[in-house]
Amino acid sequence: MSNYNHWFIRARLKTRQLLLLVALAEEGNIHRAAQVLSMTQPAASKLLKDLEDVLGVPLFDRLPRGMSPTWYGETMIRHARMALASLNQAHDELMALKSGHFGQVGVGAITSPGLSLLPSAVALVKQEHPNLRISLEIETSPVLLDRLEQGKIDIVIGRLFAEHDKSSLRYEPLTGEMVSAVTRPGHPLIGVSNLSLRDLHGAGWIVPPDGSVLRHRFDLMFQQEGLSPPINTIETSALLFMTRMLQQSDMVGVLATEVANYYAAHGLMAKLPIELPCQMDAFGLITRTDRLLSPGAKVLMKALKQTCLTQYGIKLDQD
């Protein structure tokens, strides 16, 4: 079979049908979806019916007060979003090349590699390609993986959990993540010898939000010592707030060790002399297997792998 004998060529799939699917998903109403796309409602209805006829399945349930995607519709909407995002990216890259730029790349990372790995890798890229436009996001792994699926970023440095669909993802593990207890410099606990979890049990803690993996392991750590989890807590993942709160109180925070080292080196925090037995799972480089990396993303990936060698002593394949 010819590579060009695709179903969508035979079906004469139109870009406007993809746009209509996304608009219907967002508006839930064919009248409003047609307005958004500057077409008449009959024209929108015909576009949708033509697509359903070709596919042989209903994409939306027609309800008294709007339209709701079927399982078939949900699948088509997801792929329509990816196809449109890819077309937009192609246009952005072409425009960037026309204006003398090398292109663009979007990367997302969890906090620890965002602090230790990304700056060095980006500096490497900027030495060779100063005109490459780089957008960076520091977020949780689930948020970043959603953005990777939507085509909003190209590379994620984060974690994969059991609930994530791995069928279209490539994962290259990097390293595990140690966790430290941090306080303001000069905190009374800093000078305590043989510091134990029991010594910290009564402290006020700044902890990750309930439901996060680190929070679960933090609570478990105390339970395994026969202690109840601390009650005097503030839940936040906002580093700026934590830094300021620690400076003006005797509270204790829990942070990835690499992040704690950074703040301690700048005198904004101090690490308590205790090993916390709640190490986080390994994180790694995550990309899509069903999408080719753009030229800019390839350049950044190469720099990330070079930096992994110096930062973590890990040699990754350069492909």
Image (spheres, helix red, strand yellow):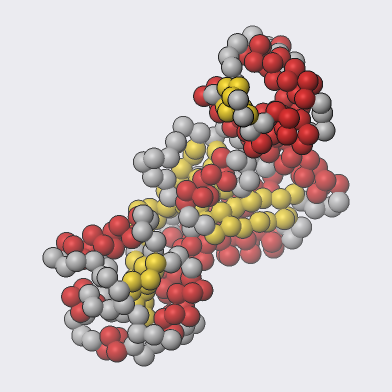
Residue at the outermost right position: 99
Residue drawn at (75%, 17%) of the image: 46
Residue 311 in the image: above or below residue 264 = above
- In-front residue for pair 28/288: 28
| Residue 227 as seen in the image, left or right of residue 12 | left
Residue at the outermost front position: 64
Residue 179 in the image: above or below residue 139 = below
Residue 272 in the image: above or below residue 20 = below
How far from the left and from the top, in percent, is residue 191? 27, 89
- The part of the image, by quadrant, that contains residue 199 is bottom left
**Which quarter of the rendered picture does the C terminus lie within?**
top right
**Which quarter of the rendered picture does the N terminus lie within?**
top right
Residue at the outermost top position: 1
How far from the left and from the top, in percent, is residue 88? 74, 40
Residue drawn at (28%, 85%) of the image: 189
| Residue 260 as seen in the image, left or right of residue 217 | right
Residue drawn at (71%, 11%) of the image: 10
- In-front residue for pair 127/11: 11
- In-front residue for pair 154/142: 142
How far from the left and from the top, in percent, is residue 75? 56, 27
Residue 171 seen by the camera: yes
How far from the left and from the top, in percent, is residue 252? 34, 77
